[in-house]
Image (cartoon, coloured by chain):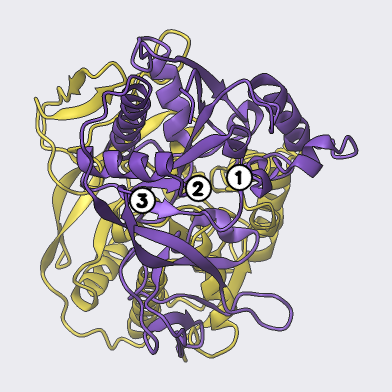
Chain colours: A purple, B yellow
Amino acid sequence: MSKIKTVAVVGGTHGNEFSGIYLLRKWQQSAALARDSFSVETVFANPKAHNDNKRYVDHDLNRQFSLADLANNELASYEQSRAKAINQQIGPKGDAKVDFIIDLHNTTSNMGPSLILLQSDRFNRQLGAYVKMHMPNAVIVLEDHTSVEQHHFLSSIAPLGVIVEIGPQPQSVIRQDVLDWMDEMTQHILDFVHLYNTDELLPLIPSYEAFRYHETLSLPLDEQGQRIGMVHRSVQDNDFEPLHSGDPIFTLFDGSEVFWKGDYEAFPHFINEAAYYDNNLAMSLAKKVQISTLD
Amino acid sequence: MSKIKTVAVVGGTHGNEFSGIYLLRKWQQSAALARDSFSVETVFANPKAHNDNKRYVDHDLNRQFSLADLANNELASYEQSRAKAINQQIGPKGDAKVDFIIDLHNTTSNMGPSLILLQSDRFNRQLGAYVKMHMPNAVIVLEDHTSVEQHHFLSSIAPLGVIVEIGPQPQSVIRQDVLDWMDEMTQHILDFVHLYNTDELLPLIPSYEAFRYHETLSLPLDEQGQRIGMVHRSVQDNDFEPLHSGDPIFTLFDGSEVFWKGDYEAFPHFINEAAYYDNNLAMSLAKKVQISTLD
């Protein structure tokens, strides 16, 4: 793979996820993002949603980057237009000006400092190893079930893109621990890209634990689509802790419990994420995997 | 004081504080709120804000209940109109149909199950004692620095009113632990009112610890009103833990620390509450007090 010449660091893709927005402001006061072997551009993705103190104005911006939607001029809501403008600025997807995108997100879930990789090629596997080695509490999540081209995420504009996803942080709040984790993880990623570019990468751990996305669970609903239950207290806050068949997963408002019936050891994450309000999702489930950096 | 004949239990005064809204739905399926000595009415205060998944549509509903504002027909925003409708339904303030209001709120701060009393008369002091006795992790907060008539809160419509304030819970999330705490505290309050009405109150603890609101601190801002810092990591989540002069209180985005210069032992609460986004508040400070139930 060729060198990475240009990196985009993106904050505020969701307007009420504050860490990235405030870090962009902070970094603009210094050379904290600068590395010798590539140039860095910052993008404040959704200023209007931030100004309204909302995740988005009309549509979730981080679902607007499929090739078909970017090419469809009938899609003209605020975020659909904003997606086209960002695609023009750092894309276009498929032939992008930037080689690598770091998109900064917060979650209300107790996911700690998570790095979401969208591919499992050697570069991404090595990046995960480097981040784990320098930040032992980092969690590596693989969402490589679809090709980058088919992803709808902002970070799919470039051939390489990752999502830095840090929580727990309520929407519209800045927590120092979360801000510091996001700052640290972003610096490690930029360091890795520089060492990769300059062929100075020291030997990496041969393998490490990661979590590969498998499926998404919905909250229990009645026939009218109203929620009739919530995440069970034994699951709440236990992101990346194992869940087995027969474990309680939901408590209904009538007091009864619902048990998980899966046939594998699952690792819930994005548990009770506030942004799932719209679509009544409860959590994502992953499988634990060992990632090799050797092959 | 005469008996309490009518109680209003209010949820959804802020549209993205979910516990009260879902508890109202739950309670409507059963007789959980019913007691023999008084009638109970439920009020879903701000359905439009809940539908929009926001704290409020135009103005904070829980600041619209001053006598002057309720009488001012020029004030016609959604919440200003909604305040007048609620005042007609369960008030009017000064001559209210209901004798006692329980207003259910969530906070993103780590306040646990808190009961905010707006007066320190014997009824309120005994109520606090009863709740502490039956729910030892409950925290009693006094906001009795102004008369009920002068309060702008929804619960000031009736001669007696309290705020049940439970956290930490991100906006737009239902946590089971928080829901259960709110349910339990509401039941204890209703039990107390019934025992008070029927002269069946058993002897209460002679005194207990509570926290009296003293002042509100703002976040550090620059001359343009932009935030330049955040709550210090040593204060975050430490609601109701003591703060002394010289303790770090804010971290500026440039990395420097700000120290508290107060001349008393303070007990921060509402630390980093998300709803403070609008006005850049950092936390409230209280003084610890001993409340007697004897006099």
Image position of A206 with respect to B26: above or below: above
Of mark 3 and mark 1, the one earlier in the sequence is 3
Q: Chain of mark 2?
A: A
Residue A148: give its label. Answer: 1
Of the pair B230 and B254, the residue shown nearer to us: B254
**Badge 2 and badge 3 in a common chain:** yes
**Residue type beneath disc 1:** Val
Residue assigned mark 3: A140
> Which is in the foreground here, disc 3 or disc 1?
1
In primary-sequence order, the first of circles 2 and 3 is 2
In the rendered view, would you say B39 is above or below A168? below
Please identify the quarter of the rendering in which residue A240 is found.
bottom left
> How much space separates mark 2 and mark 3, taking CA atoms?
12 Å
Task: Looking at this view, name the residue that lies furthest to the right.
Answer: A74
Secondary structure type for disc 3: strand
B237 lies left or right of B17: left
Marker disc for residue A119 = 2
Q: Secondary structure at mark 1?
A: helix
Q: Amino acid at mark 3?
A: Ile
Disc 1 crowd rating (10 Å Cα; few below 14, some 14-19, many 20+) is: many
| Type of amino acid under label 2 | Gln
Q: Quadrant of residue B293?
A: bottom left
Residue drawn at x 38%, y 35% as measured from the top left = A174
Label 1 resides on the chain identified as: A
Label 2 SS:
loop
Mark 2 to mark 1 CA distance (whole Å)? 7 Å
